[in-house]
Amino acid sequence: MFNMELNKGTARKLGGSLVVAIPSGVVRQESIHPGDQITFTVKKQKKSFRGVLKGISDFKEEDKFFHD
């Protein structure tokens, strides 16, 4: 079973609109066909900055800033 909120897609430009593909597993599970009316929720995904600063190691005890 697919959780609709966990499916992700990338918006693409098509004419004056943006389109997102529905994953084939969801199409099969919900029996969606061309021309069907569907309801969906849109939520922009927050960017992850994980791995942006490659090569920088974790903070060490001596890296802490002490404020008195």
Image (cartoon, helix red, strand yellow):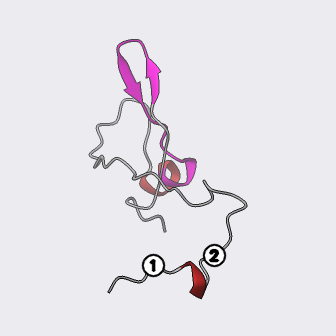
Range shown magenta: 12-26
Disc 2 + disc 1, Cβ < 8 Å: no
Q: Is residue 37 above or below residue 31?
A: above
Instruction: Write down the residue under mark 1.
Output: 65
Residue at the front extreme of this rendering: 68
Label located before the other in sequence (2 or 1) = 2
Q: Is residue 11 above or below residue 46?
A: above
- Disc 2: CA contacts within 10 A as few (<14), some (14-19) or many (>=20): few
The spot of residue 39 in percent (x, y) is: 26, 46
| Callout 1: SS | loop
Rendered-image quadrant of the C terminus: bottom left
| Callout 2: SS | loop
The spot of residue 42 in percent (x, y) is: 30, 46
Of 53 and 67, nearer the camera is 67
Of 59 and 47, nearer the camera is 59
Find residue 37 and report its image quarter.
top left
Comparing labels 2 and 1, the label whose residue is closer to the camera? 1
Distance from the alpha carbon under mark 2 to that under mark 1? 15 Å
Callout 1 amino acid: Phe
Residue at image location 49% in from the left, 44% down from the top:
9
Q: Which mark is residue 58?
A: 2
- Disc 1: CA contacts within 10 A as few (<14), some (14-19) or many (>=20): few
The question of residue 34 being in magenta is answered with: no
Residue at image location 44% in from the left, 17% down from the top:
14
Left or right: 40 as drawn, with respect to 8 = left
Q: Is residue 27 above or below residue 57?
A: above
Callout 2 amino acid: Asp
The spot of residue 21 in percent (x, y) is: 49, 37
